[in-house]
Image (tube, rainbow, N blue to C red):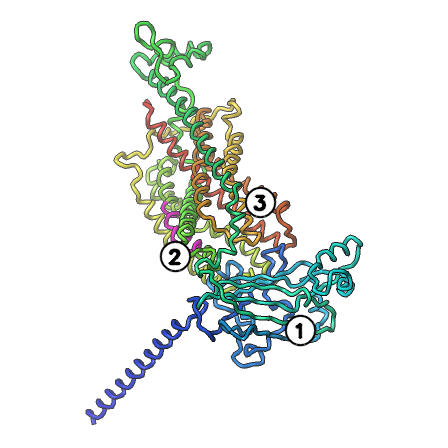
Amino acid sequence: PDRALHQTKTNACIKTMKQILSHSTLLTAASLVAIATGDEYTHQYKNGDRVDLWVNKVGPYANPQEAYEYYTLPYCAPDTKHHPSNENGAFNALKAHSIGERLGGHALRHSGHDLIFADDKGGVLETCKTGELTEEQTALFARAAADQWFYQMYVDDLPVWGMVGEMLPDLDAAKSEKFGSDLSHLEEAVAKHALEGGKLTPYVYTKRTLVVSFNEDRVVKVDLTSDPSSLKEVKKGMALQFELDVQWAKTNTPFHSRFDRYLDHAFFKHQIHWFSIFNSFMMVLFLMGLVALILLRTLRKDYARYALNHGPGGRDLEMAEQHDHHGSDEEEEDVDENGKPLLDEGGRPSGPGRMGVEDSGWKQVHGDVFRAPKFLPLLAAILGTGWQLVTLVMGVVLFAVAGPLHGEVHEERGEVLHAILVFYSLSSIVAGYASGSYFKLYFATTPAGRAKGGAAAGGATQWQLTMGLTVLLLPTILVSILSVLNFIALCYQTIYYIPFLVLLKLFFLWVFVSVPLCILGTLLGRHAKLGGKKSDPFPCRVNAIPRPIPDDIQWYGVPANLIPFAGLLSFGSIFIELYYILTSLWNYKFYHVYGFLLGVYAILCLVVCMTTVIVVYFCLNSENYLWQWTAFYSGSSTALYVFLYSIYYFVFKTSMNGLVQTSFYFGYMLLISLGVGTLCGTLGHWSANKFVRTIFQNVKVD
């Protein structure tokens, strides 16, 4: 019996394994058949394959974010096998979307039309008829015609657009005039009718022609036209019959260039675009020359004067004080234009400088210049977020520039947003490390850091605060603004509403990827060696008691007077490119000149760094040692001009209207401005830090 039971179990196991292998073989064969057959993912078809026609959205042309699902309008379901009355029909079925597609406002649904690849029947006419229009349905079509609603469809990932309807005068009267029954000159009739003050009536296109061009086994071109003669007046109780004429045509256009027709090369590669790059480059050269001429030569004079002050025989400060009031002009003559000391006939330094002069200008603050700034945890978190944005922007731009290697980003829906999510999550470690190392650098100069046990007692709380701010700062701002926009989109039922499952995925991505990397980066920054071989990471010791900041200084020594000029110069280097970016975001153009964007990004970094150095030097020369926040504000002031320009663009360059579109426009532009400000402020602070360290490393300090 045991042997029989064992044999039975063995046979059952063998049978189970055969079933598993059989199912695996079937799955493998099915996969191979799917690969061989091809679909919209492989973009390869054979004669007789089904090609899906997806409908994406419909909405006012002037308001890109006020978009609704296509079948929000009372269009009828095509009388095909996908009709809702048939079993297993795909009509209005939602297509699988990535997170990037959902965030980009894509909600593709099956149109219900049945397209067969390379159909040789000379065209297939698919029709359907609505029921009698209710008052609500009539109002929807009338609103669509009055507000110039358009719709978007996709065939093999190629978009096509069409208008829902038109506002026209009496159609029969227009036909009876010289324009003819083809209505090819209806625009002239509308203009004439408008001048006469006539009333316009809503009409809807009822016949559309879809021409799909293919090259061998690939779809390379899609055209959609609406027949003007099919315009029907929208009336309550009236039934509308819609027609779609699907035609297939052969073409020699190669598959790899099928998206070129969507790229507006004449707009993006206009001479003005090239001139703007050249103009920004010349601005960089001018600023570099200005920094070299003003700062370097001035610093050489400062170094030479301080060397005389601390050289042999230069300690008599009492003699220097005698010349303090009436010898100011002579002090400037202690060194020549090259920064070398002037000599008398005996070869010794001439003038009062040989007797020593009291320190003045930026060297006076050597004991306070490396003092911790106010709100150290907050500044550390902001700078950490800024470095994350610097890394994020550079990564996304380089990813887009490398499009020919992995696929152009403008050809795939939501790919840029998907790349932003990936780079944001991975760059969280940069944010943590930057904030942690910056806090560690300056915490030792705070009262808590100086006190015994400060690092263990108050320091632990400050470390936790810094790490918490770094983790939560940017996500809190994003969630706050996007929650308001999402609530508005939900109330108006637009497709830009972010579904709950997408929000859940984003939350998991943040919790399980971004937050751990940020915490890890903070710990790495906390234990990083910042001082090199020296125990003190700063060139100068920090005094225990802060020195007072003088009040009577020149206007060019006041940070509030210099910061706006620094932001204006930075904005001047990017505003032309900003126009192209805003046009792509809000005017239905595909941005594809990422090489330009990379060059402008590099120019912006250089301009921000140099303008911030100039601002910080003037402030230090006025004996104002609070340079950290000044440097950040100097770079981040660019954001103010970006937001002001967005207001100008909204008023004069668009026709946007309504609560939905206005909220989305200014909500997104506020996020963009805050991001630009944080990024530029971080770069400005970094350049100022390098500058301050450099000048104080080369000065002998008592």
Q: Amino acid at mark 3?
A: Ser
Q: Which residue is mark 1?
A: 241
For discs 3 and 1, the disc positioned in front in the rendered view? 1
Which is nearer the eye, 54 or 499? Answer: 54
Magenta region: which residues? Answer: 419-433
Find residue 232 and report its horizontal and vertical position in percent: 71, 68
The residues bearing labels 3 and 1 have C-alpha atoms spaced at a distance of: 44 Å
Nearest to N terminus: mark 2 or mark 3: 2
Q: Where's residue 414, x and y in %?
A: 48, 58
* Front-lying residue, 156 or 60: 156
The location of residue 208, given as percent across then percent down, is 62, 67
Residue 330 shown in magenta: no
With 135 as the anchor, is 550 left or right in this view? Answer: left
Res. 375 visible in picture: no
Res 583 seen here: yes
Q: Could you tell me how far apart the alpha carbons at marks 1 and 2 are, in whole angstroms?
A: 45 Å
Q: Which residue is mark 2?
A: 406
Question: Which residue is at 49% across, 73% downward?
Answer: 50
Residue corresponding to mark 3:
646
Callout 2 crowding tier (Cα within 10 Å): few <14, some 14–19, many ≥20? few
Residue 431 in magenta? yes
Kind of residue at badge 1: Gln
